[in-house]
């Protein structure tokens, strides 16, 4: 089973590309695996290709849509921020502005008001049956 953290990572990627946060997030891409940034809508195909190129046989693979209800959007944002390896690069006086930019990204992408007291986070979960292939034949 693979947990789909793509939505959160895409938000951090967007911030790392912004002029305001680029300087503080310059090493961002070094911390996340390739599977976390498959193009939107291509997650299943990308994961299957990755598994097969790594010597696995994909018996079954699904991308499940899930939703987790957070009692407050601030709680959700704090959970997201705790997974940002570049957070220590951001000066303490800019932490609030960074959190607000993250809030804007998530509320826009989920159609939620900035003032919403709660937050329902929609995410994807990879579920599958993957077998290790004993012998990988190489051609050519």
Image: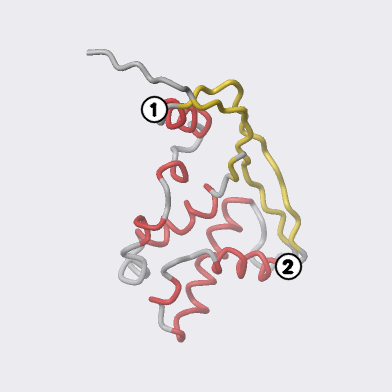
Please tell me which residue is depicted at 53% across the width and 72% down the height of the picture.
99
Q: Quadrant of the N terminus?
A: top right
Say above or below: 7 vs 65.
Answer: below
Q: CA distance from mark 1 to mark 2?
A: 41 Å
Location of residue 80 by image quarter: bottom right
Question: Residue 113, image x and y in percent?
Answer: 67, 61
Classify 10 Å Cα crowding around label 1: few (below 14), some (14-19), many (20 and above).
Answer: few
Taking depth in this image into account, of 110 and 138 the one nearest to the observer is 138
Q: Specify whether 140 is left or right of 114.
A: left
Please tell me which residue is depicted at 63% across the width and 41% down the height of the picture.
125
Res 53 label: 1
Q: Quadrant of the C terminus?
A: top left
Q: Which residue is mark 2?
A: 72
Label 1's element?
A: helix
Say above or below: 17 vs 77.
Answer: above
Taking depth in this image into account, of 69 and 29 the one nearest to the observer is 29
Location of residue 106 by image quarter: bottom right
């Amino acid at each position: 089973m693979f947990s789909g953290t793509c939505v959160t990572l895409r938000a951090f990627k967007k911030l790392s590309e912004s002029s305001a946060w680029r300087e503080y997030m310059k090493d961002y891409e070094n911390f996340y695996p390739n599977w976390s940034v498959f193009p939107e809508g291509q997650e299943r195909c990308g994961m299957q290709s990755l598994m097969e190129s790594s010597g696995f046989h994909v018996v079954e693979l699904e991308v499940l849509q899930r939703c987790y209800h957070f009692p407050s959007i601030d709680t959700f944002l704090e959970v997201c921020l705790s997974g940002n390896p570049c957070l220590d690069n951001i000066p303490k006086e800019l932490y609030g502005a960074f959190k607000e930019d993250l809030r804007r990204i998530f509320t826009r992408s989920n159609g939620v008001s900035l003032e919403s007291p709660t937050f329902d986070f929609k995410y994807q979960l990879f579920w599958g049956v993957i077998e290790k292939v004993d012998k990988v034949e190489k051609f050519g």
